[in-house]
Image: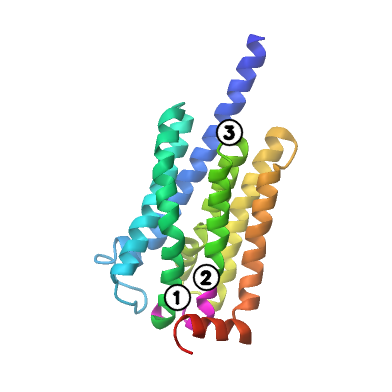
Amino acid sequence: MAHILGAGSSKAEREHRFFLRMAALILLFTVIGFAPSYYLRAFIPPLHPMEPLNLLVHLHGIVFSSWVILFMVQVGLISAGKRHVHRQLGMLGILLVALMIPLAIAVGIAGIHRPLTAAPGIDPLSWAALPLLDAPVFGGLIISALAMRHRPDVHKRLMLVAMINMVQPSAGRLIGMTGLPGEAVGPLSGLVVLALLAALLFRDWLATRRFHPAVLIGSAIVFARIALTPVVWSTGPWLSFARWVSGGG
């Protein structure tokens, strides 16, 4: 019995370490990717002209940064066995989610009138598809994860899938630093997201010889969003919708 318990504990510890490393990687992507355009903007010369920061952008930056930090802390608390603190901080997470979704939509719409926020060479009306189509995806994944708190295996995997999905903007900014054309930024940043999802799927397979249903479903939703966005964003209906929602008639 002791041997079995020890093996189970070792398996749990390995899983905790994996989630902790993924959380740290997501935090690293966020800090480095947004350093030139937000966190260290006053100290790093821009690679290309950028829109001025306004109150809405700052609110978005503060709330989303707080969420990424909270995710790192929450994963660390579970790894340290402090589940009661994790549950208490979960209330803060619910509050942040309630702010994140409308802020993401508002920033996406406002970006249509801030053309320098789009990747070079991409129509701002088209570029708005990235945040506006992504908001219901990451919002739905996070809300589903919170609703499944009674199932820790589902909860933490849906949460990690949602966080991996959120890596695309920071990955896109990192890729943009290489000087690649704007048309390449979206697909390549999407590949980064898919690679991280593949790592999660592969890790589950190695540990249990099966893919966890929550990861399969979440990854399929994220993949569909990544694949469909560049197809949708240049269509007449999307351009008309983006023009309408931005107040352009």
In this rendering, the count of numbered labels is 3
- Does dot 3 land on a helix, a strand or a loop? helix
Mark 1: few, some, or many residues within 10 Å (few <14, many ≥20)?
many
- Residue range (magenta): 116-131
**From the viewer's perspective, is residue 8 above or below residue 153?**
above
Please state which amino acid type lies under the numbered disc 1: Ile
- Which of the 4 quarters of the picture holds residue 3? top right
- Does dot 1 land on a helix, a strand or a loop? helix
Residue tagged by mark 3? 15
Name which residue lies at 50% across and 57% down.
167
Image colouring: rainbow
Q: Are marks 1 and 3 in contact (CB under 8 Å)?
A: no
- Does dot 2 land on a helix, a strand or a loop? helix
| Left or right of residue 210, residue 159 in this image | left
Q: Which of marks 2 and 3 is nearer the N terminus?
A: 3
Q: In the rendered image, is residue 180 in sight?
A: yes
Q: Are marks 1 and 2 in contact (CB under 8 Å)?
A: yes
Check the image and name the residue furthest to the top: 1
Please state which amino acid type lies under the numbered disc 2: Leu
Please state which amino acid type lies under the numbered disc 3: Glu
Pick the quarter of the image with the N terminus: top right
Residue tagged by mark 2? 132
